[in-house]
Amino acid sequence: MTAFFWIFSFINFALISVLMLIWGERRLIGKFQARLGPNRWGPLGLFTPIADAIKVMFKEDVEPSLSDKLIYVLAPILMVVPVFMIFPVIPYGAKSFLTNISVGVVFVLAITSINSLSVLMAGWASGNRFAIIGGIRAVAMLLSYEIPMGISAAGVVIIAGSLSLNEVIEAQIIPNAIFQPLGFLTFLVASTAELNRSPFDITEAESELVAGYMTDYSSMKFGLFYLGEFMATIASSAIIVTFYLSGWRGPSFLPIPSEFWFFAKWIGVISIFIWFRATFPRLRIDQIMSLAWKGLFELSLINILVIALMMAIWPDPTMTQLFIMTGINWVVFIGSVYIFGKILSPDLTGNKMDKRKVVYGLD
């Protein structure tokens, strides 16, 4: 009975969080674009996500005649179910967690990688050329960005000396976002790509692929994809807070519950993802792949090399040594970003262009 209660509570918590995120994102993007956003259903449009959910549930459920029925149905389920498995292992407070598994870091990284499988299944099962192209794009991009994400997470594990999420938080005397900014930047960008959010939303590029892998989905199957994407955003934000923002830890001199600090940081990271969507234009597929293999991959290797060397020199650092290590990491961060920024920036001086690349609209 207790297990059922906790499972029921986490599912409802996730669903309510998704509804609030949908409403908050639409309102915030409206502010970015100097408009009101949803404001009709309920005070400040709070009931708009509920109205959208009711509309989706009552739409006709159409299945393409050329689709693979079994995979077509399983794909949206596979998008949603694994994300639910992340929430019970996240420590929301000093004593607020459902379970503390010893390999929590590996577990959450493994669960997040299942997303690419569901997207490929959806594109392939639909029998639609736009959906197939969107699915193939997704797998190419997601697999490319999982590598720098995993390497960046290895830097967190080296510092903590453990794969347990609770011990990762307790080891952050200085938040990892400050202690290893290069790893934080790499993980944040890779997470944005894993979520298929702007500027990495090439899998459902409306101007090119209609709705990408979701083109032939309707009713609740489409709703499950929509739900899964927003739940993944919430889960990834919680992972970033745990890995790099010291989780539930806050100033010890303030008598504030540890859960408050976690949720405040959680909302802050989600706001960053929304800011990305409102600000950056979508990248081309070649630009996205170049960023993964010519930028983030090398930056993540530099980060883990520097972290490993410093931990070998100072295996049990004092506070003074931690500040020295932080300074070294910031020097490496600024230098690496500057150098790779120069390498990845297009050469527009003298209208020079690589003739081997075809860029439509510039020929």
Image (cartoon, helix red, strand yellow):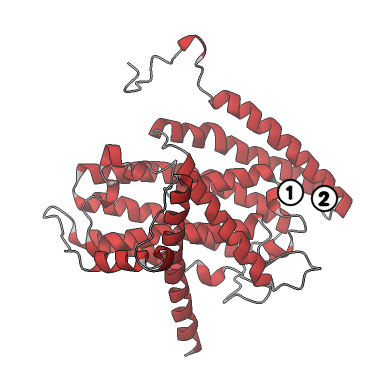
Residue carrying label 2: 322
The quadrant of the rendering that contains the C terminus is: top left
Residue at 72% from the left image edge and 35% from the top image edge: 332
- Above or below 339: residue 315: below
Q: Secondary structure at mark 2?
A: helix
Count neighbours of disc 1 (C-alpha within 10 A) and say few if under 14, some if 14 to 19, many if 20 or more.
many
Residue carrying label 1: 179
Q: Is residue 193 left or right of residue 202?
A: right
Can residue 164 be seen from the camera position used here? no
In front: 226, or 154? Answer: 226
- Above or below 236: residue 275: above
Going from N to C along the chain, the mark reached first, 2 or 1, is 1
x, y (%) of residue 131?
Answer: 25, 46
Q: CA distance from mark 2 to mark 1?
A: 8 Å
Q: Secondary structure at mark 1?
A: helix
Residue at 76% from the left image edge and 43% from the top image edge: 309
Image marks 2 and 1: residues in contact by CB distance under 8 Å: yes
Q: Is residue 217 left or right of residue 340?
A: left
Q: Residue furthest bottom?
A: 1
Answer with the quarter of the image where residue 84 lies: bottom left
Residue at 21% from the left image edge and 68% from the top image edge: 58
Task: Say which mark, if any, is on residue 318.
Answer: none
Count neighbours of disc 2 (C-alpha within 10 A) and say few if under 14, some if 14 to 19, many if 20 or more.
some
Can residue 323 be seen from the camera position used here? yes
> What type is the residue that disc 1 sits on?
Phe
In front: 229, or 108? Answer: 229
In front: 130, or 361? Answer: 361
> What type is the residue that disc 2 sits on?
Leu
x, y (%) of residue 362?
Answer: 35, 18
x, y (%) of residue 224?
Answer: 32, 63
